[in-house]
Image (cartoon, rainbow, N blue to C red):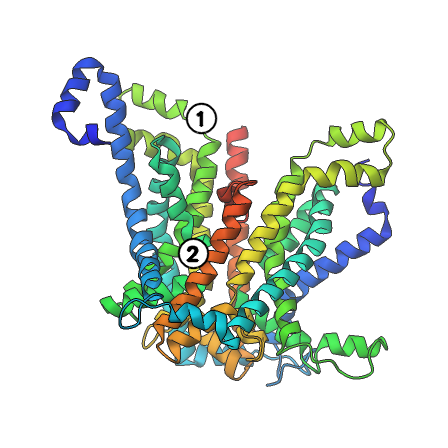
Amino acid sequence: MKNFDMSKPVFALVVIAILVFLILPVLIVIPMSFSDSRFMSFPPPAYSFRWYEDFFDSLAWMSAAGTSITVAVSTAIIATPLGVSAAYAIHNCDHWSVRYIKMVLLLPLIVPVIIVAAGVFFIYALTGLLATMPGLVLANVMLALPYVITSVIAGLHGFDPAQEMVARSLGMNRLRAFMTVTLPQIKPSVVTGAVFAFIQALDETMVSLFIAGGENQTLTKRMFTALRDEIDPTIAAISTMLTAASFALVLLMILSRNASKTATAH
Amino acid sequence: MTTLTLPTNERLEASADPSVLLQKKEQRSMMLLLIPALAVVTLLLVVPMAWLFLQSFYSDGFTLEHYQRIFTESIYWNTFALTFKISFIVTILALLMGYPVAYAITRLPRRWSMLVLAMVIVPFWTSVLVRAYAWLVLLQRSGIVNDSLLGLGLIDNRLSLVHNELGTIIATVHILLPFMVLPLYATMQKIPGDLLMAASSLGANRFMVFWRVFVPLSISGVVAGCTLVFVLCLGFYITPELMGGGRTVMASMLVSRNIQLFSDWGAASAVSVVLLLCVGLIFYVVGKFVPVDKIVGGAK
């Protein structure tokens, strides 16, 4: 019964074809990035590291990468505590307004990102935050909050609140009880939220097209412009590194989750 | 809420039942925890959206001209029509491709299902720009897809697969497919195997078990996945901009062009409001069947 469907070769072939469709574009950038040629020919006529060298030698690309990494790290550092405290409040509060507040906090996921970008652009033009580091970080915090909040709420659902009650009845105040009892147990969901926030900020393109600029040009904005105007295999080198970074982070997240699972199982 | 702000009432309640007061006090401090997150989203999203809404009715006083333009000028009208057409095609394709994959993940032995799931999630975590670049390479005139089709003798002349609507659709399906597979998988996973066993032990053949039992039970996942894909596609910008070759103009590009090229906030905000109304309406209607936070939360 379990896998009678896979015995049907047509079904298996269809699924494999779809999986190839999904994974091929992600894999193809790797050989492309080691190409020796200026052109997007595949397979590359010869292999080299020249596009990686180009990237690391280019002041413009390096400063964009620096901006993006700073933004992503700051976003994760700021969005995680904000998201955790909001998720904790949403989970524990039964006030009627909480449902609506949760809706508002999830808005950045629902509202088309072009509208988010236009709105942020407008506010920043008024307040002088355009093309500034605080502006970029703040916008990314807003975009990352829903990911942290949904992840942590899911973590809190799997946590028995009685444990925190016990800690408090033994004389801990709520903050200490949360820090020493609850937080360690929902840690995987917090780590997941932080990783989501980081990757979100690293990949964010639309809003930074509107608000990044000058010294604070992000990697994605430069990539977008390069892709639209003249395609250069440096993009493939950056893509490979970006993909490797996201992949490593997701792997780390899964490992940390499994580690804590085995830890609680023992 | 009002009782909490009046100290006299608090004291009254305290004398009545200290534990109730404590609970209320705690609820209030809980609400404080929400303030930082709420402030960020309000200032950067809610306030600007309200401003966009007002702006869409403004041009030296109250006016409906921005909306009038959307419904009368063919470029606006055609853009919205194209946006809906592409979103519709992408949603159907994503469902046709996502359903078998999600089904395979639920039915395969664990080791294989994890591998398939990984193949869905890895692209999900890959930057949209990276994937746009990959598709430009694959679909170009001298790309692998054209080469293979020629090599197999399926075509005689190289096809224009990119810098047009087709390229946009292909790349968009690729980007949105995980948003279809993940909610589908989440729903299918919860379908008890016993039910399928029961159906087949009662004499249903495999086809009937699938169509009469499995598919109806997976409908909420189908609804969630289709809603997510459709709504995300309505607001797509980067992919059509890069894959469409400047000819595939979608609604979000009207917003961006009006702001960046013409500084025309009136037109941009009217398009935004119409786009947002479409999204809101879809969530409202679908929300009657599947809770919205389930749809959104199920994805990532």
* Image quadrant where residue B173 sits: bottom right
Residue that label 2 marks = A198
Q: Residue at x 35, y 51 (%)?
A: A79
Q: Are marks 1 and 2 on the same chain?
A: yes
Task: Describe residue B264's horizontal placement relative to residue A38 as left or right.
Answer: left
Q: Position of residue B2 (x, y in %)?
A: 21, 31
User: How far is mark 1 from mark 2, CA to CA?
Assistant: 28 Å
- In the depicted structure, whether residue B297 falls above or below residue B253: above
Residue that label 1 marks = A160
Q: Position of residue A6 (x, y in %)?
A: 81, 46
Q: Chain of mark 1?
A: A
- In the depicted structure, whether residue B246 falls above or below residue A117: below
* Image quadrant where residue A29 sits: bottom right
Given the current orientation, which residue lies at the most extreme left position? Answer: B8
Q: Nearer the viewer, residue A69 or B195?
A: B195
Q: Helix or strand or loop: what does disc 1 sit on?
A: loop
Viewport quadrant of the N terminus of chain A: top right
Q: Chain of mark 2?
A: A
Viewport quadrant of the C terminus of chain A: top right
Circle 2 residues within 10 Å: few <14, some 14–19, many ≥20: many
Q: Residue at x 56, y 78 (%)?
A: A49
Q: Residue at x 68, y 34 (%)?
A: B191
Mark 2 is on which residue type?
Answer: Phe
Mark 1 is on which residue type?
Answer: Asp
Q: Nearer the viewer, residue B264 or A174?
A: B264
